[in-house]
Image: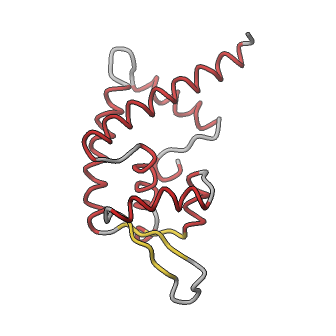
Amino acid sequence: MSDTLDAALRLVRAQAALVRRFDSRLSGLHGVSLADFTLLLRLSEAPGGRMRRVDLAEALGLTASGVTRGLAPLERIGLVTREADARDARVAYASLTATGRQRLEEMRATAEETAADVFAAPAWNAEDTGRLSTLLTRLGGTGLAGR
């Protein structure tokens, strides 16, 4: 097996393990998945805590229908609401509710703890995590606020 294929497969497996770990913690404590948390986090970073659904889909690397499917349960539990554009009825916004903002802060604390556990010393140091972030950015990965 080539080194590049080996590296790609290792990255895929590591990503799957991270998703499982985050899903387990977020689901157990907050009833949401990592995908839900990521969607809520992206909304929170938008001006006014709202985004056009099409822009949210692009920011998350999803299809418009994928965003709609992801938003539906979050709307049902009151974390997100749908807003129509006053000037164009064809445009729909997803917006964080006050409850959504509050719950997101709780979720964020859990995600921060989980990330700290993943990158705990002595296996990882600040230089290692910084280098990893730089390498992942080279592959197209973005973090908070698109960085």
Name the image colouring: secondary structure
Residue displayed at 24% across by 42% down: 29
Residue projecting furthest to the top: 1
In the displayed structure image, the side of residue 88 where residue 16 appears, left or right: left
Residue displayed at 39% across by 49% down: 37
Quadrant housing residue 19: top left
Q: 126 above or below 142? A: above
Q: 11 above or below 65? A: above
Residue projecting furthest to the bottom: 87
Is 112 in front, or is 12? 12
Is 119 in front, or is 69? 69
Residue 125 screen position, x and y as percent? 39, 21
Quadrant housing residue 2: top right
Residue 44 screen position, x and y as percent? 40, 61
Is 10 in front, or is 75? 75
Residue displayed at 31% across by 62% down: 77
